[in-house]
Amino acid sequence: MTCKVLLADDQALVRAGFRGLLSRARDLVVVGEAATGDEAVRLAARTLPDVILMDIRMPGMDGITATRRIVSDPSIPGCRVIILTTFDTDEHLFDALSVGASGFLTKEIEPSELRRAVAAVAAGDALLSPGITRRVLERFAGPRGPAPVARQRMDVLTTREREVVRLVALGLSNDEIAERLTISPFTAKTHVTRAIAKLSVRDRVQLVILAYESGLVRPGG
């Protein structure tokens, strides 16, 4: 299936570069370009992209605010956002995660990695290295402590599903979870998918956030 991609960046040269890189993949098609956050929101509603490559710093509405509006809009179902920036800071990382972004990349990414990243996010996978994910979420969860509502939400999971969610939050891939629990990768993926459905979260990133908020995983492991 063809993956529809929307580009949102205030620099025309950057957008042209991304369009050129993505056009080399047969299963990716750029359906629009936005120079501001407001334009990105409007184009997303009109073109219904599968993935948006979203810059953080744009005139008017920034990329974080635009992401929040897009992922919370029921008229744009299944749209996933990859935040692209030159600023690799904890503040931006957590802001992107907290509003529902499915990935975070710096603009120095290699062309082949960018195409793989878009395909991965379109398939529902998270796009954050385990090290970055844990660094940001541990910083966020540390001073707050577990949230009672988040703890209650975890009650819908089976013991095995809770165990799988904990390993996801620790940064393990499906293959690594399968090896740790002596199950097949397909079974590991099934447990992750069921946990996402039961907890009504968007994707693997939001699953990790909830695991930290609930206290299922504590800062430091």
Image (cartoon, rainbow, N blue to C red):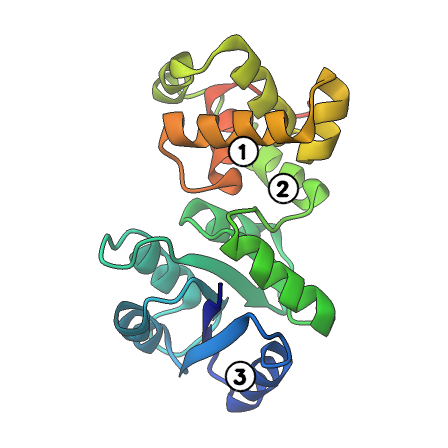
Relative to residue 47, is residue 220 depicted above or below? above
Whole-Å distance between the Cαs marked 1 and 2?
8 Å
x and y, in percent, of residue 116 in the image: 66, 62
Q: How crowded is mark 2: few (under 14 residues within 10 Å), some or many (20 or more)?
A: many
Is residue 184 rendered to the left or right of residue 104? Answer: right
Who's the residue at 56% across and 24% down the image? 165
Relative to residue 45, is residue 68 depicted above or below? above
x and y, in percent, of residue 123 in the image: 52, 51
**Residue carrying label 3:** 15
In the rendered structure, which disc, 1 or 2, sits on the residue that comes first in sequence?
2
Relative to residue 142, is residue 103 depicted above or below? below
Image quadrant containing the C terminus: top right
What residue occupies the far top of the structure in this picture? 159
Who's the residue at 56% across and 46% down the image? 125
Who's the residue at 59% across and 36% down the image? 139
Q: Is mark 2 on a helix, strand or loop?
A: helix
**Residue carrying label 2:** 133
Whole-Å distance between the Cαs marked 2 and 3?
27 Å
Question: What amino acid is found at the position of numbered circle 3 in the picture?
Answer: Arg
**Residue carrying label 1:** 208
Q: What element carries label 1?
A: helix
User: Is residue 55 in sight in this rendering?
Assistant: no
Question: What amino acid is found at the position of numbered circle 2 in the picture?
Answer: Thr
Question: What amino acid is found at the position of numbered circle 1 in the picture?
Answer: Val
* Residue 191, picture quadrant: top right
Q: Residue 102 carries which label?
A: none
Q: How crowded is mark 1: few (under 14 residues within 10 Å), some or many (20 or more)?
A: many
User: Is residue 155 in sight in this rendering?
Assistant: yes
Of residue 61 and residue 31, the one placed in the foreground of this image is: 31
In the rendered structure, which disc, 1 or 3, sits on the residue that comes first in sequence?
3
